[in-house]
Amino acid sequence: MGAMDINAYLTGWQTAIVPRILIGLLGLLIVLILARTIRSKRISLVPAILWSLAAAVLIIFSLFPQQLIRTVISTEYVMRMRIMMGFVSLLVLLITLESTRQARLQERYALLWVATALVILICAFFPSVVNLLRLLMGMNYTAAVVSVAFTFLTLVLFHFSISMSISQAKQARIAQKLALLETRVRELEERR
């Protein structure tokens, strides 16, 4: 993005009052709906956190002053990416730990998500790990980060596929045993 494009965007954003107001109102609407659902206890903690983050992002984005946008744009691309990776991995850790605490996620699955989040967090805090992978594979920084995340998510999905297959096999055996027991109960009732 050239300097001319950035200045046009910044000037346009500074004067785009109606879109900024609409974005801010959408964030406030999410806050109001969220407050109502929390008050009526129809939402658990994890979705409440995610909706709160979405509302905060919308409100903050609508209030971004021109100077803050200039600062963010002038920050090195890799640094912005590392900050985003760190934020996402911390969010995944928080959601995983909270879901495990509320007994909505079993520990064996939580370990996979924690491992994935920690690997992404390590890549965010130690860019030399990503640089080594980038140099070995001949890709740019973004592709290296995406490949690390994709690899771990693929492993998680593979594990879930195995778990689902095992669960379906167990359900089939249970259904067969139940059918045999029902048949046996019917036979016993007929003998009486």
Image (spheres, grey):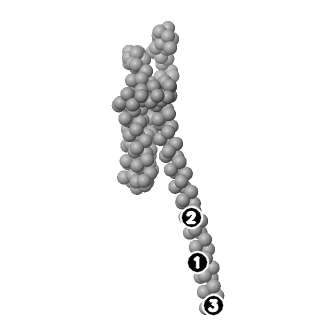
| Residue located 47% across and 9% down the image | 3
Q: Amino acid at mark 1?
A: Leu
| Residue nearer the viewer, 22 or 71 | 71
| Residue located 50% across and 39% down the image | 151
The percent coordinates of residue 98 (x first, y second) are 38, 48
Q: Amino acid at mark 3?
A: Arg
Residue on which disc 2 sits: 171
Give the distance between the C-alpha atoms of the residues marked 3 and 1, in whole angstroms: 15 Å
Q: Is residue 126 visible?
A: yes
> Quarter holding the C terminus?
bottom right
Residue on which disc 3 sits: 191
Circle 3 or circle 1, nearest the eye: 1
| Residue nearer the viewer, 51 or 80 | 80
Residue most extreme to the bottom? 192
Q: SS at mark 1? A: helix
Q: Is residue 48 visible?
A: no
Circle 3 or circle 2, nearest the eye: 2
Q: Amino acid at mark 2?
A: Gln
Q: SS at mark 3? A: helix
Give the distance between the C-alpha atoms of the residues marked 3 and 2, in whole angstroms: 30 Å
**Label 3 neighbourhood size at 10 Å, few (<14), some (14-19), many (20+)?**
few
Labelled disc at residue 94 = none
| Residue located 56% across and 57% down the image | 165
Residue on which disc 1 sits: 181
**Label 1 neighbourhood size at 10 Å, few (<14), some (14-19), many (20+)?**
few
The percent coordinates of residue 140 (x first, y second) are 49, 24
The percent coordinates of residue 84 (x first, y second) are 42, 30
